[in-house]
Amino acid sequence: MAVVAMWKCDRDDSMFDNKKDADAYDKMLELAESFTQFLEKHAAGISEQDAETIGLLLSKNKEQLIAACKGKPEVLLSLGEGDSEADSNVTELSAAG
């Protein structure tokens, strides 16, 4: 029987087969949490769920947002046309066990 090392994200129980992907995913969730707190503080009337959804959207697409802020706003128009690369490395805990 082989032993397979897995890394578990304690924020949402996602599982990864390598530390690099697990760390990147954790950083993405940390950024999403900061965006969520920012939105809740500065966007009067926004629900917690909407703030979390927007926070995750911004965090998952940070590279495109950076490019848009640097003068290429058209990159935002292509968001959602392909599969998210970050999600492709996630194994749900229920699927892993």
Image: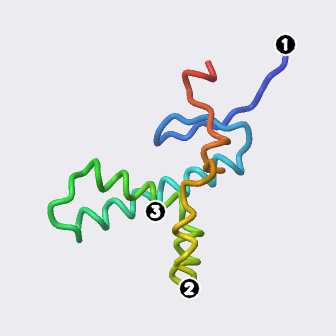
From the viewer's perspective, is residue 64 above or below residue 84?
below
Mark 1 sits on what residue?
1
Residue 70: give its label: 2
Which badge, 3 or 1, comes first in the chain's sequence?
1
- What residue is drawn where x is 47% and y is 38%? 12
- Camera-nearest residue between 94 and 11: 94
Say which quarter of the image contains residue 88: top right
Which badge, 1 or 2, comes first in the chain's sequence?
1
Spatial CA span between label 3 and label 1? 42 Å
Residue 58: give its label: 3
Residue 10 position within the rendered picture, expressed as x and y whole percent measured from the top left: 50, 39
From the viewer's perspective, is residue 3 above or below residue 74?
above
**Amino acid at the residue labelled 3:** Leu
Say which quarter of the image contains residue 66: bottom right
Residue 94 position within the rendered picture, expressed as x and y whole percent measured from the top left: 55, 21
**Amino acid at the residue labelled 2:** Lys
- What residue is drawn where x is 63% and y is 52%? 82
Please state which of the two labelled residues, at mark 1 or mark 2, is closer to the viewer: 2
- What residue is drawn where x is 55% and y is 57%? 27
